[in-house]
Amino acid sequence: MADIAIELAALVAADRVLTRPEDLVTYGFDGTAALSAPARVVVMAQTVEEVAAVVRYAAANKVPVVTRGSGTGLSGGSVPVPGAIILCLVRMDRILELDERNLTVLVEAGAITQQVAEAADRVGLLYPPDPGSMKISTIGGNVAENSGGLRGLKYGITRDYVMGMEVVLASGDVVWLGNKCVKDVAGYSLKDLFVGSEGTLGVITKVLLKLVPKPQARRTLLATFGRMSAAADTVSAIIAAKIIPCTLEFLDRVTIECVEAYAKVGLPVGAEALLLMESDGHPAVVDEQVQAMEAIARRCGADAVVVARDAAHAAQLATARRAAFSALARVAPTTILEDATVPRSELTKMIEGVQAVAGKYGLRIGIFGHMGDGNLHPTFLTDERNTEEMERVEKAMHEIFTLAVRLGGTITGEHGVGLAKKRFLPEALGEGSLQLLRQCKRAMDPDGILNPGKIFD
């Protein structure tokens, strides 16, 4: 321990190499329940030169490197591996350039997502990706996990806004991938290889992001239903009407009850499902879409539809969705937030399947998520100290992910694979695709020092 700390202190300032147990404890876990490991040493890098120097040291000494931002990940992607250097980039947090002529912003990997969004907002622009952790998550982490968010249906996910990036490779070499050009087909799109790579192929240190004009208007409405199938029918009918809301979110009965107990926003606790819908764009188009979505919801069997009176009322309605995880987390000692995605046409089958699995294994599972893009978050309310119950949770998870794949879906829509889901990956991808992933890993990181054991062994 002392030797590696001394050697790393020669590469960065000594006070930014952490080895004391009380300093390391925070870096032993991320946002994933029931996953943790002791950290050996943490380096708080401040420049790309320091990152490159640490990676070169790790390469020369065959020491694993686990890159970390704010630690909000939900698949164990930044949990330490034995003997690893934890390379933390939260101090690399500058917004380097906001280019209004090209609608781009260049940021360091440790920049907080909400701060980037606010910088864009101040000049009348929008950075659309809005993961639930955006108040504390970093752009580098968002890119490494290819994060989604509530606006994904209309605006897409993180990958859709990455125009370029600076990456430190496993050798310690620094490369720039991409540019400000809207069109560029010169060679392989290498930047896309690193988006969603979970720190296994390189260390992302800077990111060039695309911005879009800020919508002139936004309106919110909330509908409640006595049947889950009616909520799913509403989503299908809205899309069939060629309306693409910026937000189309849902909560099930368990989640509604937890949110109302937590936030007291006036939700009907007897409802089986809730839809939060938002439209943005030109004021006339927004008004037209809100009226159409209200009519569709009522036609599909909504018990009630509330249209926000103003921005304050809209924020209150949105609390029903944005408070979902916090509300569920109060109910049991351990909250395991999972995600699975299916085609929209299979949403009812998937939700009913999750509910059936919960009953089969005697578990309490709340379901909420991005119904507009088929991304659901089955949330297990459990206790990791109860070994027998955790065994039932494990079996239930496997059945849920198997069902998602059988319905033409995937085991993760936005949280990533990491440690938590790598055992489910072969079933989801098939051996041919998995071998391609392994070949990419071997080509980019032949000694396997970058976040080893994540995504696959």
Image (cartoon, rainbow, N blue to C red):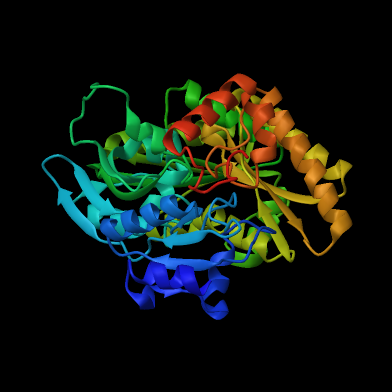
Q: Residue 200 at x, y = what percent?
A: 48, 43
Residue sitting nearer the eye, 314 or 8? 8
Q: Residue 266 at x, y = what percent?
A: 60, 60
Most extreme residue toward the left is 101
Q: Image height check: is 360 above or below 37?
A: above
Q: Image height check: is 438 above or below 261?
A: above
Q: Is residue 147 visible?
A: no
Q: Residue 76 at x, y = what percent?
A: 59, 52
Q: Is residue 434 visible?
A: yes
State how many labels appear. 0
Left or right? Give the position of 185 relative to 296. left
Residue 314 quadrant:
bottom left
Q: Quadrant of the C terminus?
A: top right
Write the residue at 69% across / 27% down. 427
Left or right? Give the position of 110 relative to 85. left
Write the residue at 25% across / 21% down. 185
Q: Residue 421 at x, y = what percent?
A: 65, 42
Residue sitting nearer the eye, 330 or 96? 96
Write the residue at 65% across / 25% down. 346
Left or right? Give the position of 242 relative to 119. right
Left or right? Give the position of 249 relative to 142. right
